[in-house]
């Protein structure tokens, strides 16, 4: 699942959450199939065609660095992670400045049901369909989301609290290419104790 876009489209994994509703367990370190979620999410980005991956850490960042095996990733620490996903998105986009990336594909660490197939589909929408694209699940926009570099400043300016890029995308709904991924991915989040049953 690779093509000439590999170096131009970076993967950005938001993995800073502290798991407040999970008793304060950092989501990046939750175990799934014997490995931390952060490793699964990075593997999905790589297998989906993103050769360059930036990972935003926050809660227990030092522990994540020590326990997770993330070779070749650019680890970005967000000291303001407790302010919500918006701050992590801003930190991640800032880390891409000067890298030569033309677009970024953003995914979330707590969605293990979204794998390489969805990443590849959304990534391939770049260029042919414009510079804004998102996975769609039965018509509802979800992750991963792709932003061309021309949108990064606007996304960063609009990213507040836990909303991330939601407001930015909603304001430009007509420009967003929706890529149906419901046949290859499950967009559930690991947010609560009950959700932990989804992990293996």
Image (cartoon, rainbow, N blue to C red):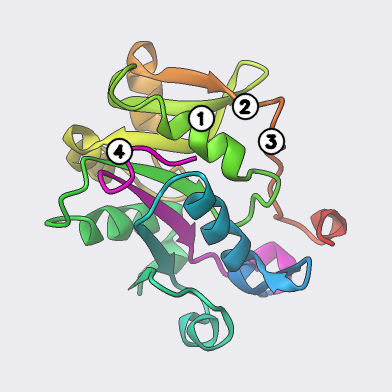
Image quadrant for the C terminus?
A: bottom right
| Label 1 neighbour load within 10 Å: few <14, some 14-19, many 20+ | many
- Describe residue 152's horizontal placement relative to residue 23 as left or right: left
**Residue at (53, 50) in percent of width and height:** 47
Measure the alpha-carbon separation of dots 1 and 2.
8 Å
Marked residue nearer the N-terminal end (2 or 4): 4
Assess whether mark 4 and mark 1 are in contact (beta carbons under 8 angstroms): no
Measure the alpha-carbon separation of dots 1 and 4.
15 Å
Location of residue 105 (image quadrant) = top left
Measure the alpha-carbon separation of dots 3 and 4.
24 Å
In terms of secondary structure, where does tag 1 sit?
helix
The residue beneath circle 4 is 4
Relative image position of residue 94 (x, y in whole percent): 22, 57
Q: Is residue 16 magenta?
A: yes
Assess whether mark 2 and mark 1 are in contact (beta carbons under 8 angstroms): yes
In terms of secondary structure, where does tag 3 sit?
loop
Label 2 vs label 4, nearer the camera: 4
The residue beneath circle 3 is 185
Relative image position of residue 55 (x, y in whole percent): 41, 64
Marked residue nearer the N-terminal end (3 or 1): 1
In terms of secondary structure, where does tag 4 sit?
loop
**Residue at (48, 74) in percent of width and height:** 70
The residue beneath circle 1 is 121
Range drawn in magenta: 1-23
Measure the alpha-carbon separation of dots 3 and 1.
11 Å
The residue beneath circle 2 is 181
């Amino acid at each position: 699942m690779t093509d000439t876009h590999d170096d131009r489209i970076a993967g950005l994994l938001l993995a800073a959450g502290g798991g407040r509703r999970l008793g304060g367990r950092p989501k990046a370190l939750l175990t799934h199939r014997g490995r931390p979620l952060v490793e699964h999410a990075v593997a999905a980005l790589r297998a989906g065609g993103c050769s360059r991956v930036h990972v935003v850490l926050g809660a227990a960042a030092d522990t994540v660095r020590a326990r997770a095996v993330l070779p070749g990733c650019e680890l970005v620490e967000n000291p303001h992670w407790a302010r919500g996903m918006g701050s992590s998105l801003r930190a991640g986009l800032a880390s891409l400045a000067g890298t030569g990336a033309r677009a970024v594909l953003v995914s979330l660490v707590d969605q293990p049901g979204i794998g390489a197939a969805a990443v590849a589909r959304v990534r391939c929408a770049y260029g042919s369909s414009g510079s804004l694209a998102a996975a769609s699940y039965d018509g509802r926009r979800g992750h991963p989301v792709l932003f061309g570099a021309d949108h990064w400043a606007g996304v960063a300016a609009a990213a507040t609290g836990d909303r991330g890029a939601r407001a930015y995308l909603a304001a430009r709904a007509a420009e967003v290419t929706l890529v149906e991924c419901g046949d290859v991915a499950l967009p559930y989040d690991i947010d609560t104790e009950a959700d932990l049953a989804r992990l293996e």
